[in-house]
Structures are given as C-alpha cells and as structure tokens.
Amino acid sequence: MLFEVSDLSVEYSSLGEISRAVNGVSLSVASGEVVGIVGESGSGKSTLALALLGLTRRNARITAGSVRLEGTDLVGGGLSEKQLRQFRGRRIGLITQNARSSLNPTIRIGKQIATVYATHTGAKRADARAAAIAALRLVGINDPERRFEAYPHELSGGMAQRAVIAMATVCRPDVVIADEATSRLDVTIQAQILDDLQRAVQEVGSSLVLITQDLGVIANYADRLYVMNAGEVIETAATSLLFAAPGHPASVSLLESQLDLSELQFRLRGLPVDGRELPEGCWLQTRCPFMDEGSGCRTVHPELSDIGGGHEVRCHRTTVVVGRAAELAR
Amino acid sequence: MTAGPVNGGPEAPVLEVRHLSKQFAIRNSRKLVHACDDVSLELYSGQTLGLIGESGSGKTTVGRCVLRLIDPTSGSVLLDSADITGSSKRELRRLRRQMQIVFQEPAESFNPVLTVGSQIELALKVFSDLPPAGRKRRVADLLDRVGVPAVAAGLLPGALPAGVLQKCSIARALASEPRLLVLDEPTSALAPEAEADVLGLLTELQRDFGLAYLFISHDLSLVRSFCDFVAVMYLGQIVELGPKADVYTSPRHPYTRALLAAVLRPDPRQRLTRSGQGAELKGEIPSPIDLPAGCYLASRCKYVTGKCSAERQELIQIDTSTVVRCWRAGDLPTAPTTGGE
C-alpha cells in the first residue's frame, strides 16, 4: 500500500484535561486512488489531516499509531525534522480551506511556487520557474506566464485556490491531502476547481485524500470513503456502495442532512460527544435514534466489521440501520 | 413582483423594495462599485424569499439597504407600506423593532467578553419598556423559545457551539418582536446537523409568529428546501424571480440554469451525467466596477448573441409570478433537470 495509517490517535491537552480527538484511525490509500474522509465538524477530520503529515497543533500530540508512506513511518519512525521535510511538501502535498492564508501576500505567486520546487529539488532558478508555470497551467490557469507575476490579492478566490493546488502538486507528490479545499468557494467555481484538482493529481500521478463535510464532493470525486465520528472511523466502503446502503446512524444522519428533505427522521440529537469524557459502549449512544440497550449500545464499544464487499461499519444495529435508511439512497 | 399574500387576501406586503440601487465610491477614484442595481421585490407576512447568488452578487447589500444599515443610492424601501427610505435615525430606532437581522457568524455577532444573556437583555433594554427583573425573565423565555438551555444565559459566547450560539442570536433578534427578519447566510458557518437544527427552529418561529424572512444565501439546495420564493442575483441585478418550484424545476435564465447545474449532489450516480456536459458558464464574474454594456452575463453565457452584448437587459414578466432578465428566455432549449430530486 502506498500510504497507510494504522491505529493513529491524537490528544489535545488543555487546562490539565485530555481530549481525545482522533482515536485509533486506520486507513489506506492506494497509488492513484481518490479517497474521501467525511464527517460532521468536530469529528476530528482536520486534526487527522495534519496528523497525516505527522503534524499537530501546539497543544496536541500524536499518542499512538503510524503513518507510513511506502513503508517509512512519519510518526513513530524516529525521523528528524530535516528528514520529515523531505516528505512534507515534496512527497505529501497539503491544500487547506483558506487559500489566501496559504499564500504569502507580499510575494508573487509564481515565485512562491518556484521556491517550493527549488527548495525540495535543488532545481536551478530557470528550471524552477518552468516547473511553476507548468504547474499553474496544469490546474487550469490561462496564460500562466502572466499569472506567475501576480500577487495573491490580484487573484479571485478560485484563482488563489488554483495557485495553492499548483503549489501542492508542483513537486509531483505521491499523495495530496485536500482539507475542505473548495468549501468556501461559490458553487459555480467549486466543481471547476475540483475538476482541475482531479486532473492535476492524475497528471502528476498522485493519490488524493479529500477531507470534507460535503457528501456532494465525495459522491462526485472519491473512489472510496471513510466516515468519521468522535475521532474514529465509523464506516468505510467504496463510494457507490456506501451511498447505496449507508450502514451507520452517523452516516445516515449526515446524508439525510444534505438531501433536500422536508423532514429529517434519522437526525442525531444534541452535540458531538465530548472527547474528554468518552463513554463506555458506543460513543453515539446518547444521540442515536437506533440506540438499543439490548444490543449492547451502552456497554460494548462496537468494532468495525465487514458487512460485505469491503463495506465496514462500527455499529451493533447495522442491519436495522441499512434496512430503514434504504429509502434515503433511492 | 412576488405573488400575493399566502392566502390571497388583501393584506399589504411587510416589505416592498422598489428599484433599489446602491453604488459605493472607491477612494482616490471616480469609479463606482455597482453593488446592487434596480432591485425590486415584495415580501408578505409568513413568507420566505430567498436571495441567492455568488459572492459579490449584491445579496448582502440588498439586505443591509432594507434595514437601512446602509443608505441606498436610489430607489425605495417600504415597511408595512410606509416608505422608510428617508426616515431619520430616531425614526429608524423605532422602525427596527419591526425588522431585525441575523448574521452569518454567530461568534462575530456577539461581544466575546459579555455573557450571552446580558447581550439579549441589551436588546430588550433598547426595544422594550420592561423593568430589569422582567427583562431577565424575558431573556429566559426567549432562550426557551429557541430551544437553548437557560444556563447559556450566564455563559460567554465562546463557551457555546456555533449552532447554539446562532440560536441565541435569533433569540436576540426576536427580543423586539419583529415582523421581518433578514437572515444573512444564517447557517453557512454551521455544520450540516447544526444547520438542520437552526432551520427547523426558523420554520417553527415563522409558523408561530408569521414572520417574513428575507433569506440571503449562496446555497441553492438550502434555499430550495427553505424558501417560498427565490430571487437569483447576478452582478447586483435580479436575473430571475419566481415561486421556488418554478425557478428550480424550469429555470428560465441561463445564469439560474448554470447555478443549478453546478451543484454537486450527494449521489455518485450524478458523476456520469456531469462528466458528459461541458461547463454551463465560462470564466468568472466580471468586475462590478466596469460593468458590461449589454447583458451582464454576456461574456460567460453559452446562448449569447450580438444583441445580448449590445443591449441592457430588463426584467421580462414571463407569467403572473415569474420575471426573468433575458430577452431570449422564451426560446432557449429546455433546461436540463439538474440540481433536482
């Protein structure tokens, strides 16, 4: 497997309290694959996005697990910061939600992209410039020689996001991680940017990890997806399989909330579980319309189990859920 | 221009906007930003009008002009048939009991260092004659009405999740017992589930109090599920306005069609249909400073003809309740049924 995450956990500590944001996440990304990670906000997606690069916010730390790119562990492998920099930006690209905050406002965008390339590859100035222009062209920017000279503020939101994609792909990385890369853009631009991103990663031969809460993005671009809740993977399957028969109450609730329905019947109640006080049993027990004491929802934490065709679900009540939610997938 | 009252009665609209335009001056320049241009609409009690469009289309400017938070350059705003375009500051203070706004970011519409309860109470201090003890009780009632636990009153805004805090800002807007709420992207900062929660609350409040909502959003599926009428804005102009069902199932304006076609539906089967068709619109929105001479969409529209680029487009009445700003609206090919079920 090209990119493999095993049992990854991340904790935040604040005022002496520990909050478990990512809990034993395992996932894999094959070469050339587009994998989606989806979940409501607060489900640990963005913490996971950083951890995939071996990074955490200041008050967090990775407490367990591994993140392996072609076998090399970025987390527990004892790599130095210098060695890690050979991975971040070069072999793993990152695209974040807010394009403008990823760009230096005082430097022309072409130069920023060329610098990334030169830093990682040691290329000469002219070669780096050529690589940057090629990267800009690849993401659908017309007249890249002229845009090379633009400052970030001269670009529209869509163009700025394209420039960030060019920066993330210029080194032809193995994996590109896109964390809510289009969620702040207008609808007419969103699909264009995602099309450009998809084309760019295909062209440079990267795999793509799309992290989002928008199931429309997943449905249209991801080959396979992982659904997260309370920092753990609660369901995973090929995209067409999961949309046809969602098997976890949290997936069903998420899907229902994004369909144009007049009434919601599967909605999870209340707030996401507090990562400081994860209960015994299922972490969704207080919010779940399918909760059933007799099935062990209050006492036994469910494991991910295969319900067929590589479709894995972490729920004691999956059979009931699949049956009742079938109408959503019509 | 919108259809009549819900029950077809003789009631006057709560809000009427007539030929509203707003231009902003640019510092050190003689040029103007044309933020909204000849916008007319009507809104009746108990109705929701969705104002949709991309960023920079002028939706928010319309909302702010309606409340007189900014003054329109021309045109007029009528609240309960009374022209408030020229009302003084003092009169506006009284009028604002009738019309309130809920902003996009709940965290930014509260003062971070004052408790939520004290900020709702402040609205009561301004808009009601209640004594302090009565205000406290009313704060508790308002929070209860929006389904927020009473303990929230004593907390700072930062201690509450965004969805709960947005409900508190709705409670604050309700403090003056308004008839019109301008909802400016009230859920776009929220997670899908919190969003569903807030929308459910708004629906309930409208039913109970007959509120009129001007619902500003860039989210098409949201407007579809939530509004009665839809006005689509592009570069400051309304390009199509009509009952939701008509606009969504048989969009007439090329821009409306493009917007609907662009929505990524949570359905993997859409992939096949999407990859077959080219982009509905070319390029990005032109600058509102140097507006095109003819139709504002001409540079991006695939149905463009010479006449489109030469002549300014006016709104054309298509049927009793729908208007479209496109002279070709009648003879365009049948719209693809995207963004649909």
Image (spheres, rainbow, N blue to C red):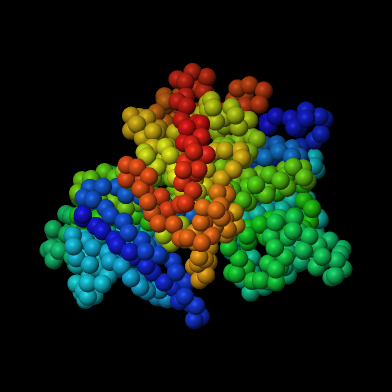
For image coordinates 41% across by 50% down, the residue present is: A313
Residue nearest the observer in this picture, A264 or B8: A264
Residue nearest the observer in this picture, B212 or B293: B212
Q: Position of residue A280 (x, y in %)?
A: 50, 65
Residue B279 position by quadrant: top left
For image coordinates 26% across by 47% down, the residue present is: A33
Q: Is residue B186 above or below residue A230?
A: above
Residue B152 position by quadrant: bottom right
For image coordinates 49% across by 81% down, the residue present is: A16
Indicate left or right for A196 with B105 as reference.
left
Q: Is residue A291 above or below residue A21?
A: above
Residue nearest the observer in this picture, A76 or A103: A76
Q: Residue furthest bottom?
A: A16
Question: Does residue A295 appear in the picture of this structure?
Answer: yes
Q: Position of residue A289 (x, y in %)?
A: 57, 49
Q: Quadrant of the N terminus of chain A?
A: bottom left
Question: Does residue A137 appear in the picture of this structure?
Answer: no
Q: Residue furthest front?
A: A294
Indicate left or right for B240 with A131 as reference.
right
Q: Is residue A69 above or below residue B76?
A: below
Indicate left or right for B5 with A68 as reference.
right
Q: Position of residue B260 (x, y in %)?
A: 48, 34
Q: Position of residue A203 (x, y in %)?
A: 20, 45
For image coordinates 51% across by 31% down, the residue present is: B341
